[in-house]
Image (cartoon, helix red, strand yellow):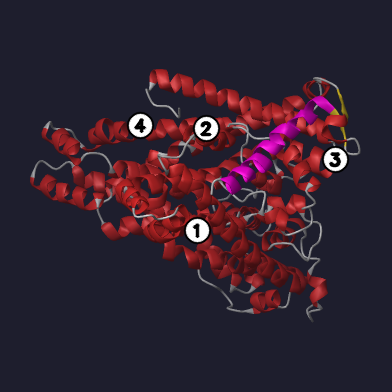
Amino acid sequence: MVTERRSAASVRARSAIDDGRWFDAGVNAVAAVILLIVLYPLLFVLSASFSDPRQVMNGEMWLWPVGFTLDAYREVFNYGAVWVGYKNTLFYSFAGTIVNIFLTTLAAYPLSRRDLPGRNVFMFVVTFTMFFNGGLIPTYLLVRDLGMVNTVWALLVPNAIATYNLIVMRTYFQSNIPWEVQEAAHIDGCSNVRMLTHIILPLSKPIIAVMVLFYAVGHWNAFFNALIYLRNDALYPLQLVLREILIISQSSYLDEGGSSFGMTEKLLLAESIKYALIIIASIPVLIMYPFVQKHFVKGVMIGSIKG
Amino acid sequence: MLLIPMAWYILFQYGPMYGLQIAFRDFNPARGITGSEWVGFENFDRFFSSYYFGRLLWNTVSISIYSLLFAFPIPILLALLINEMKGERYKKLLQNVTYMPHFISVVVIVGMLQLFLNPQAGFVNFALKEVGIEPVAFLEKAEWFKTVFIGSNIWQNMGWQSIIYIAALAGVNPQLYEAAKIDGAGRWQRIRHVSLPGIFPIIVILLILDIGHFMNVGFEKILLMQNSLNKDASDVIQTFVYQNGILQGDFSYSAAIGLFNSVINFALLVLINRYARKKAETSLW
């Protein structure tokens, strides 16, 4: 909407004295450079995953795939740990997001009501944790004492609410749902639970979409909690498997696959598998992104400016 | 309705704060938190006099300062740039492309850095060779660590962080631009005297929030990028807490270091907030 306003202004500007042509050219050129810097590494990974590893390692590939091959993908598909990780991450993202949305809504809605007794006290209790917390070690000991170490609960419960998201959601309820509607429903005998499920939530689809995106992406990309709380690799999320392949080991895991290549081929293939893995690991998030993208700018705006 | 989330807050947020007292005790799992012996500031003394203290503090503080200096202003500049662009589709393209890296996980980002910066087979070094520069093993050199860390952070987050500023720029009254134009202001002057003051409160708020996490420096990524060769530059307080606490089980000592970190963060937040309220008339509370 702003852009429309602005371009209307710029039409008028053009008729007046215009110092803008060089300025516009400069703006567009800088934009092109930024576009290139951000996009190039992404395209490079994509092309390298489809290329002959030998040519990638020799520096013959610059932008488009050379020696097109699907070997790397074929090899990843045969690697069991990747699929275990994928399955686990899907579960953590799905279950975790449900827990997150449930608890965040349960906290955000009452806190948005101006008739909540002691609201400021509750808000203080919540906000204070954004600026001060017990830190890594006491949190770890607590989770351990609750017997959650090495269980899926460790990834679902200790991070059930992100305070920042809670405040974004509360602000949305406060500013986008007219208080009069709630009062009227209340007078008509609507209970609090029914108010939330029948009035508030149907009016809050954009913010829920934003929250689902934030939380789900968070779960998909998280590795640190799994690193400290999980010992059993059958529970490992994808990111921990990736960490092992991309960052720690060089290529040894390949031996398990029992592929029929010679040693140097194996080493080469291990390199291109890394590119294929990066693509496979990022695809779900990138698929989700265009669907919620139009909502999130709104979500970020609401939360940050008024929060 | 509020009871369940409040119970969660008490248990998982305030529970660890209660557990922080182990920083002042000699924590013995068998005797529990309150049963362990009280040792006062002994754990802190041990940290302040340790060999690592100077290096940890310097790395933490310098990474944070460089981030504030370089990574903080770039999203603002990007937002101003996008705000000045006229081609609707080009603008959308730039926005959507720059948001994208934000959604890539840290593990993948560090994996990409390793592939790209590899001294034998990474494209960055091939490009350097093209222009006649010797390949550099960026990730194994302590002197390159901070540059690579902050540079890749900028690459990943500038677009995402610019959203807030773009939204704020959208809220600037267009009549102000009109008025400035009538008074003969050029494009630069309009940016300086209309756009920038328009988003100034948001800049201050985000700066305060950033400074509130001054000592945290994105340690999950540092942990992934760390290796024995770049440790001189990559050892920060939080990675040290992880290594001593979680890996070696030295709970009281690392809880004390973690507390030291949190207290500095909190003190900085309070100070900068007070300063901003006085000078810029904008503050968090």
Q: Which residue is mark 1?
A: A213
Front tag of 1 and 2: 2
**Comparing labels 2 and 3, the label whose residue is closer to the camera:** 2
Q: CA distance from mark 2 to mark 3?
A: 37 Å
Residue sitting at x 62%, y 63%: A95
Chain under callout 4: B
What residue is shown at x 75% (from left), y 74% (from top)?
A80
Question: Disc 4 designates what residue?
Answer: B200
Q: Residue at x 53, y 23 (%)?
A: B270
Q: Secondary structure at mark 3?
A: loop
Q: Quadrant of residue B27?
A: top right
Alpha carbon distance from label 3 to label 4: 46 Å
Decide if residue B191 is on the left or right side of residue A273: left
The kind of residue tagged 1 is: Leu
Residue A113 lies, with reference to residue A297, above or below; the image says above
**Above or below A88: residue B18:** above
Give the crowd class for mark 1: few <14, some 14-19, many >=20 residues within 10 Å.
many
**Circles 1, 4 touching at the beta carbon (< 8 Å):** no
* Mark sitting earlier along the chain (1/2): 2
Q: Work out whether residue A135 can be spotted.
A: no
For the stretch drawn in magenta, the main secondary structure is: helix
Q: Which residues are magenta?
A: B3-25
* Residue A288 percent location from the top left of the image: 49, 66
